[in-house]
Structures are given as C-alpha cells and as structure tokens.
C-alpha cells in the first residue's frame, strides 16, 4: 500500500521546490514529479513540510497538588490537529524516586499517544542512585536531562547538584536542559508580595521579573561550561536570558534557547485583566513579558541565536487554577498551546514577514530534530525519513476557540485570535492522522522514539575541552624547597 502526496510545494529548512512525495511502510520512498500511489492526497496550493516537533510538553504531569489535564491522548490529538507529529515530554521523578521507576510511569501514560513521542528525564534530586541510573536512562534512548532552577522545595536543584549532573551528562554524551529562574529569589519575592497583600495572579508576574531568569541563565551557562557540556535553555522568555545565550554562542559555547509561542505572541497585560480567571489561566513560569522582550525573541529566531519554538503545554482547567484564589503561589503553573503553535507562528511569523517558510520549518521541526539526535528520521522531507508530514494550507483560516479545540480544558489562552495557515492533512508515519477537521488515528498509534547519546556536538565539545584542559607545565629544573 503506497500513498502519494500530489501537486504540493515541498518546504524544508533549506529548500522550496515542487514535487510529489511517495510513502510506503511509514517512510518516504521517493520524491519527484508525477509519482503514482495506491492512495492519493491532493496538496494543490499547499506546502508539504516536516511535521512539527514540540520538544516541551507536560502531559498528565503531577504538579502543584494536581495533574495537568491534557494527557497523552488529548494532548497528542491536539498536536496532530495543529500539524505537530512528535512531542517530547518530561519524565519527572518525585524527589527520592528512582529515574527508572519514574520512566515506568511515563511508559504507561504514553501508551495512549496518537503521535510519536520521546522523553526527557528530569533530575529533581541527587545521589549515587541518580548518578548510576542516568546511564541506564541513556541506554533506554533518552539523551537529555532536565533541571529545574526554580520551584524551591519541590523540583528545584542547587548549583552543586547541577554541576554534578552536568558532569555526568558530559560523561554520557547527553545534553542537560534547564528551567532557568533563580528559585531562591522567587521564593523571597513571593513571600514579600503576599505579605503586602499582593495575592492576585499579577503577583505571579511581579515575583518572577526578567532579572531572575537572566541571572539563572548566565549561571547555568557558566556551570555547563565548567562541566564541559552543551546546554539547552527551555522557555527563554526575555531579553536578559536571550542576551546570556547570545553572548555564550558568540563566545563559541554550545548553548541553545527555546522561546515558547505564548511568550512570542501574548504579553504581561494579560495578568492585569480585571477577571481573576482570565489572569490565572495565563499563569505560567516564566510569565508573559512586555513587547520589548517579545521583539528580542523574534529577533533571536531571525538571527539564529534562538533555535526552537515550543509550547511547554501544561494545561490546567479553570477549576484547577482556582486552587490559588487568595494566594497566587498556589495557582498551578502552566498553559496550553499544542494545537496552536504552528498556526500562531505561521500567522505572526511568516504572515508578518518576520520568518521565511524555511525558517518556520527550522524552528518548529528541523533544528530540534538535530539537537535531539533524531534527524533525518524526523524533521526532514528526505527519502528514508519517517513520513511525519504536514500538508499546510497557507490560505485556510479560523478563529481559535476553546469550543472547537482538542485540548480537554475549558479555555484557550489564544481565544479569539484569527490564524491563517492550517494543516489540510497531518500524517504520522504515513498514516493520515488529521483530515477534514477530524482525528483519524486510533489512540496508541504513537510510538516511542529512542534517541542515542553522543551527538556530533557533544563529541566536538568534549574533544575541545580535552585539548584545552589544564596541564602541568613540564619544567627542566625545579628549585629546591625554601624550607
Ligand atoms: O509554568 C510552567 N512552565 N509549567 C510547567 C512546568 C515548567 O516549569 O516547565
Ligand atoms: Zn519550566
Ligand atoms: Zn477573559
Ligand atoms: Zn515545562
């Protein structure tokens, strides 16, 4: 059984050209003119692009006394509806819990996935067991380890733990990720704000100013440099953090930054809405910023100093958000975006001329596929690649609304936004997964994507670090001790 995508224009991270795409057994087997297949999908007027890869989701995540409402079933359904064909979720051991025990839980949750998925492993505490199990985790196909520098008393790890874990990542050829905010200062600012009667959702934004993110980003970059390992900074939201990443890159350090579609398109005024629910629904960390920070993030995507656009999809219902009435520190942190990332980025990026279609593919799919070591299986339109594809209609439009979304929550932070550019078809390993406004795959279609450590960039960095490591000077004559 073969499927052909006909009459479309292929758009990859580096090329735009007209060709048909022939698919068999879940993979692309031929690209060229006038191809024939058993089944045909019409891409007239459309772009054929690698499906989106969202490197940052929290599906059914235990957090702040509850679980995020979208699980692997509704979350991956939302992904496919928006042209995303792979998600990377965070396996999250509770402090004291083994990494492999946590992984079993994520294996169980993900059996319901509609699209392919992978995991990052979070390091939420540190001792010999964690050190030892990190190797077993890489052998299971997980080459990225996430560290929270915020959420003091819960997920946060300190600098000595960061350094130990980063060194272990260097030994294993893995890449550390950081949530960069100074958790100690956030805790102090939060307590002060609450004591002064600032208990509404706007207090959340006041408690996490850009400086606390910039400081933590600089610190994580320094620690990664000392440990001799690359670094991936999740949800880069402000100029202070972007500046740290930009400077590190210009100094030859292997550092990547990941802005979210929320930070690119929504600003801090949301927290000053008179409606408590409206503001609380947008509480996430880091919080939304002002227009200058947004301009910095767009410039980073244009110049290549920021690499990937993610969602950090972590969806809580209004009822869950209301746990924090009277105390903003109890509002579960997180927002949705899986279904909206590609249409919003196309509309506000390509539609405005801030991004070319090729840059759009780079920042939604190809760059992260390379960083995570799954390119060109994912993130490419090449013979031999998985047929994870989106047939993108640049003229189709809709108004985003919670009423029509796949996500299981009761609101959408992009409610009312008009988007132009939507998937006509989304294919997951050659199977039409989204068409005619409906999900076509069954839950459980998604498969785990194993990712090997030892990426070219980790090898290159360890070669350089070995070459430039301190060495004792060989001296011919050593003076006698003065004692
Ligand atoms: O507010 C957020 N971002 N919630 C999800 C957990 C995290 O920090 O990534
Ligand atoms: Zn985070
Ligand atoms: Zn509202
Ligand atoms: Zn996150």
Image (cartoon, rainbow, N blue to C red):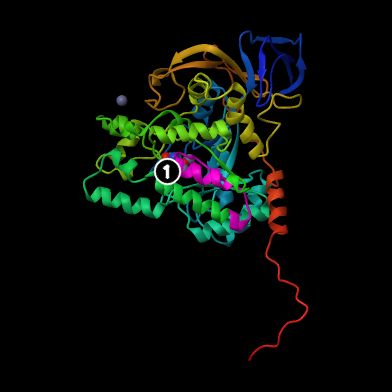
Task: Give 74 or 304, whichever is nearer the viewer.
Answer: 304
Looking at the image, is 31 positioned above or below residue 311?
Answer: above
Most distant residue in the left direction: 197
Looking at the image, is 318 positioned above or below residue 66?
Answer: above
**Residue 72, image x, y percentages:** 52, 32
Q: Quadrant of residue 273?
A: top left
Label 1 crowding class (10 Å Cα cut-off): few <14, some 14-19, many 20+?
A: some
Residue at 68%, 56% in the rendered image: 465
Looking at the image, is 227 positioned above or below residue 331?
Answer: below
**Residue 359, image x, y percentages:** 60, 27
Q: Is residue 130 visible?
A: no
Does the numbered disc 1 mark a residue whose Cβ is under 8 Å from ligand 1? yes
The kind of secondary structure element at disc 1 is: strand
**Residue 233, image x, y percentages:** 53, 44
Task: Give 463 or 369, whichever is nearer the viewer.
Answer: 463
Q: Quadrant of residue 31?
A: top right
Residue at 49%, 48% in the rendered image: 217
Most distant residue in the bottom direction: 483
**Residue 177, image x, y percentages:** 55, 46
Q: Quadrant of the C terminus?
A: bottom right
Q: Quadrant of the N terminus?
A: top right
Callout count? 1
Q: Is residue 63 visible?
A: yes
5 magenta-colored: no
Position of residue 173 in the picture relative to residue 268 (left or right): right
Position of residue 314 in the picture relative to residue 375 (left or right): left
232 magenta-colored: yes
Q: Which residues are magenta?
A: 225-248
Position of residue 135 in the picture relative to residue 110 (left or right): right
Residue that badge 1 annotates? 63
């Amino acid at each position: 059984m073969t499927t052909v995508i006909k009459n479309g224009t292929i758009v990859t991270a580096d090329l735009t050209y007209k060709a048909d795409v022939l698919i068999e057994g879940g993979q692309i087997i031929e690209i060229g003119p006038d191809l024939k297949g058993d089944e045909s999908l019409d891409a007239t007027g459309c772009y054929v692009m690698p499906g989106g890869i969202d490197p940052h989701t929290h599906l059914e995540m235990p957090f702040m006394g509850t679980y995020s409402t979208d699980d692997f079933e509704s979350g991956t359904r939302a992904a496919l509806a928006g042209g995303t064909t792979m998600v990377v979720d965070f396996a999250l051991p509770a402090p004291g819990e083994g990494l492999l025990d946590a992984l079993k839980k994520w294996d169980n949750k993900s059996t319901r996935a509609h699209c392919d998925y992978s995991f990052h492993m979070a390091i939420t505490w540190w001792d010999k067991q964690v050190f030892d199990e990190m190797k077993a985790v890489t052998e299971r196909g997980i080459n990225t380890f996430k560290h929270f520098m915020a959420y003091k008393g819960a997920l946060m790890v300190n600098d000595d733990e960061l350094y130990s874990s980063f060194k272990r990542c260097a030994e294993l050829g893995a890449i550390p990720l950081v949530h960069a905010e100074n958790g100690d200062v956030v805790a102090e600012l939060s307590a002060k704000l609450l004591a002064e009667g600032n208990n509404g959702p706007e207090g959340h934004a006041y408690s996490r100013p850009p400086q606390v993110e910039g400081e933590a980003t600089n610190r994580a970059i320094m620690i990664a440099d000392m440990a001799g390992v690359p670094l991936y900074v999740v949800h880069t939201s402000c100029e202070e953090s972007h500046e740290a990443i930009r400077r590190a890159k210009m100094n030859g350090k292997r550092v990547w930054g990941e802005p979210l579609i929320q930070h690119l398109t929504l600003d801090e005024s949301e927290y000053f809405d008179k409606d408590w629910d409206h503001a609380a629904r947008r509480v996430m960390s880091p919080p939304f910023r002002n227009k200058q920070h947004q301009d910095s993030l767009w410039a980073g995507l244009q110049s290549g100093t920021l690499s990937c656009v993610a969602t950090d999809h972590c969806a809580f219902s209004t009822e869950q958000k209301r746990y924090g009435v009277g105390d903003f520190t109890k509002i579960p942190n997180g927002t949705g975006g899986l279904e909206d990332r590609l249409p919003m980025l196309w509309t506000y990026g390509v539609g405005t001329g801030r991004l070319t279609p090729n840059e759009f593919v780079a920042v939604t799919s190809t760059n992260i596929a390379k960083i995570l070591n799954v390119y060109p299986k994912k993130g490419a339109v090449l013979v031999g690649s998985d047929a994870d594809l989106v047939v993108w209609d640049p003229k189709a439009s809709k108004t985003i609304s919670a009423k029509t979304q796949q996500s299981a929550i009761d609101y959408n932070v992009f409610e009312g936004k008009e988007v132009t550019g939507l998937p006509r078809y989304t294919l997951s390993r050659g199977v039409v997964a989204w068409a005619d406004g409906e999900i076509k795959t069954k839950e459980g279609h998604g498969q785990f994507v194993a990712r090997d450590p030892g990426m070219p960039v980790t090898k290159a960095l360890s070669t350089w670090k070995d070459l430039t490591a301190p060495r004792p000077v060989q001296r011919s004559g050593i003076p006698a001790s003065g004692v």
